[in-house]
Structure formats: structure tokens, C-alpha cells
């Protein structure tokens, strides 16, 4: 890889890719591949499925590269494409439930204060996890998620809220109890 | 932490994706798939061009046969007439050059309209084949 490619901004690389630059697009995939695959895994995809969908998303992004104007980040743009592709693929096999499922609660985060989102997401039901990931990971609005999942808007909002409540319970550091604060000196 | 504070906190947590060990391999796979899809597209376009060329040549042959018979259609006649006029004009413009090279006896005007038409067709098909070969070499 030439140094010039590393030094280029995402928008410049995207413009070169739009003109057919495969190596430039490869650099973009190198930069943001992990983020896209990570989001798909957080949405509930198995690693191999996440990789497949991420590859398809990048290929689709290459085709649409001329449409990327740099208004948001390139990573967010590809994440949105990937999230929609994953939902499309998933909707062929699954039906989302409108009500709370009987989910298996993963053990709580052991270390208070440590942000382990992947671990905390396991505590959410599949639909909550999808809704929260789509909203806060892929940047989709509630109506967009409702349309994508074919769920009522109110249901999506409650899934997001319930999911965030569960995440908050697991992610935010527990306040130190009174009388147990450590004293130095 | 309130809900208002927690939302951006979660968004930041989502934005912090761990780097994966095989990200170079992932990017290489995408580049490979891009290359193969480009190759397929080029092949498809080349095939379409060649098929189009063959169809065009076949149609031209059919129209030439029509011109050779007594049942010549008016558009075909007019096309032949136009081509003859063009060849006459071309001869007038090329004649000084032919004179300079001692080829003043060569008369382009003696070539019929259909002869020029065939020369043009052969040249176009040749160009299409050369283009296809160049594309295949690039692939």
C-alpha cells in the first residue's frame, strides 16, 4: 500500500473509488471493516454471517460511492447499508415479536465501570438488541427502524427504551455506597 | 446517569468498535470480489458488443442482398445515393493528396456507395474486435 493512500481522507478515497478506484476502496474497507462487522455482530449476527453481510455492504457501497457526499462519516454510511442488508437477509427467515420475549439473562458485567457493550448487549432480547443497535449503532431513526422491522412505531420506541434501560443497568458504574469511600492518607 | 446522558454514552460505546485482527484479509477479499465483478461486467459488455456487431453485420448483409435485387426499397436507394455523394466529395478533397503521391489515376468515385458502406462496416467490426482484445488483455 502506498503512503499516499493512508494519508488520504475518507471523502477523497470515496471520490477516487467512485471513479473506479478499487485500491482506494480497499483502503476504505480496511479502515472501516472492523466497525461494520462489529455492528453486525452487535445486532446479533454470527461472525461468519456478519463478515458476509459486511462484504456485501461494502460492494454495494462501491456501486453507490458517487452518492456519498461526505455529509456524514463514511463508516456511518456503510453501517446503514450493512444494517439494512442484514435486516433484509434476516427478514427472510425470522419474524420479529412485538412483545417482550422470554430471554435468557446473561450474567452481569463483573467489573463495575468497565464499558463492555458486547457483553451487556447479551442481556437484551433479540428485538431489543436489534432496535438499540439500529438506533444507536447504525444511526437509523425510530420510524426507519419501524419500517425496516415492520413493527409499529410505538413498539420500536418501547423496545429501544427497554433495551437502553437494561444496558444502563449493566454499563453505568455503581455509585459507591455511603461510608465505604476510600480515604487516602 | 440520566437517560439524556446515557444516550450519547451508548452511541460513543457503539462507535468504539474493536479492531479485528483480520481486517487486512477482509479488505483484500473485498478487493478481490470487486475485481471479479468488474471482470464479469467487462466480459458481459464485450459479449453484448460483439453480439450487437454480429446482428448489425447480419442486418447489413440482408439489406445488401435487398439492394442487389430489383426490389430495392426507397430508403435503401436513398442511402446508396447519399453514400455515393459522400464518396464523390471525399474524392474531390483527397485528389490533391493523391496527385502529390502520383496516384492521380486512383478514382475513389469508382467505388460504389455500397462498396464504401462495406469498407466502413469492416472497419467498425475491426475496431470492435480490437477493442475487445485490448479489454481482454487489460483483464
Image (cartoon, rainbow, N blue to C red):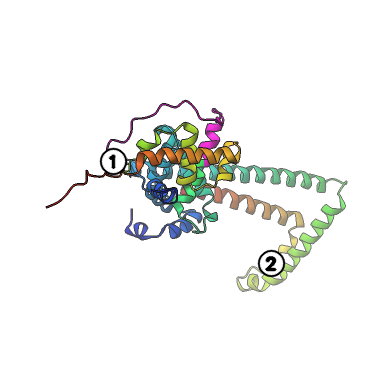
With respect to residue B83, does A46 lie above or below? above
Q: Nearer the viewer, residue A64 or A71?
A: A71
Q: Chain of mark 2?
A: B
Q: Is residue B48 magenta?
A: no
Q: Is residue A96 magenta?
A: yes
With respect to residue B137, does A96 lie above or below? above
Q: Is residue A134 left or right of residue B51?
A: left
Under tag 2, what secondary structure? loop
| Callout in the foreground (2, 1) | 1
- As drawn, the residue found furthest toward the left would be A185
Q: Which residues are magenta?
A: A84-111
Residue A160, x across and y down, in percent: 50, 40
Whether residue A31 is visible to the viewer of this picture, yes or no, is yes
Residue position for label 2? B105
- Please, what is the dominant secondary structure of the magenta stretch? loop
Q: Nearer the viewer, residue A148 or A111?
A: A111
Amino acid at each position: 500500500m502506498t503512503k499516499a493512500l493512508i494519508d488520504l481522507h475518507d471523502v477523497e478515497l470515496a471520490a477516487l473509488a467512485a471513479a473506479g478506484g478499487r485500491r482506494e476502496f480497499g483502503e476504505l474497507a480496511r479502515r472501516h471493516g472492523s466497525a461494520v462487522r462489529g455492528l453486525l455482530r452487535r445486532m446479533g449476527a454470527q461472525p461468519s454471517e456478519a463478515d458476509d453481510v459486511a462484504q456485501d455492504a461494502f460492494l454495494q457501497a462501491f456501486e453507490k460511492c458517487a452518492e456519498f457526499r461526505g455529509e456524514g462519516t463514511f463508516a456511518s454510511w456503510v453501517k446503514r447499508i450493512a444494517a439494512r442488508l442484514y435486516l433484509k437477509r434476516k427478514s427472510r427467515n425470522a419474524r420479529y415479536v412485538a412483545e417482550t420475549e422470554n430471554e435468557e439473562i446473561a450474567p452481569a458485567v463483573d467489573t463495575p465501570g468497565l464499558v463492555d457493550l458486547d457483553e451487556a448487549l447479551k442481556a437484551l432480547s433479540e428485538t431489543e438488541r436489534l432496535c438499540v443497535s439500529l438506533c444507536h449503532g447504525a444511526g437509523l431513526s425510530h420510524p426507519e427502524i419501524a419500517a425496516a422491522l415492520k413493527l409499529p412505531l410505538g413498539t420500536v420506541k418501547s423496545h429501544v427504551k427497554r433495551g437502553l434501560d437494561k444496558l444502563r443497568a449493566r454499563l453505568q458504574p455503581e455509585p459507591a455506597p455511603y461510608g465505604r469511600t476510600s480515604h487516602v492518607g | 446517569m440520566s437517560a439524556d446522558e446515557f444516550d450519547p454514552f451508548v452511541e460513543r460505546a457503539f462507535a468504539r468498535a474493536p479492531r479485528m485482527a483480520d481486517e487486512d484479509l477482509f479488505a483484500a477479499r473485498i478487493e478481490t470480489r470487486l475485481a471479479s465483478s468488474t471482470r464479469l461486467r467487462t466480459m458481459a459488455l464485450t459479449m453484448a458488443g460483439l453480439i450487437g456487431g454480429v446482428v448489425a453485420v447480419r442486418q447489413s448483409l440482408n439489406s445488401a442482398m435487398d439492394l442487389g435485387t430489383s426490389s430495392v426499397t426507397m430508403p435503401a436507394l436513398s442511402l446508396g445515393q447519399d453514400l455515393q455523394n459522400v464518396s464523390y466529395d471525399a474524392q474531390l478533397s483527397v485528389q490533391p493528396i493523391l496527385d502529390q503521391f502520383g496516384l492521380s489515376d486512383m478514382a475513389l468515385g469508382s467505388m460504389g456507395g455500397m462498396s464504401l458502406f462495406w469498407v466502413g462496416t469492416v472497419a467498425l467490426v475491426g475496431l470492435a474486435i480490437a477493442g475487445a482484445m485490448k479489454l481482454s488483455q487489460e483483464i
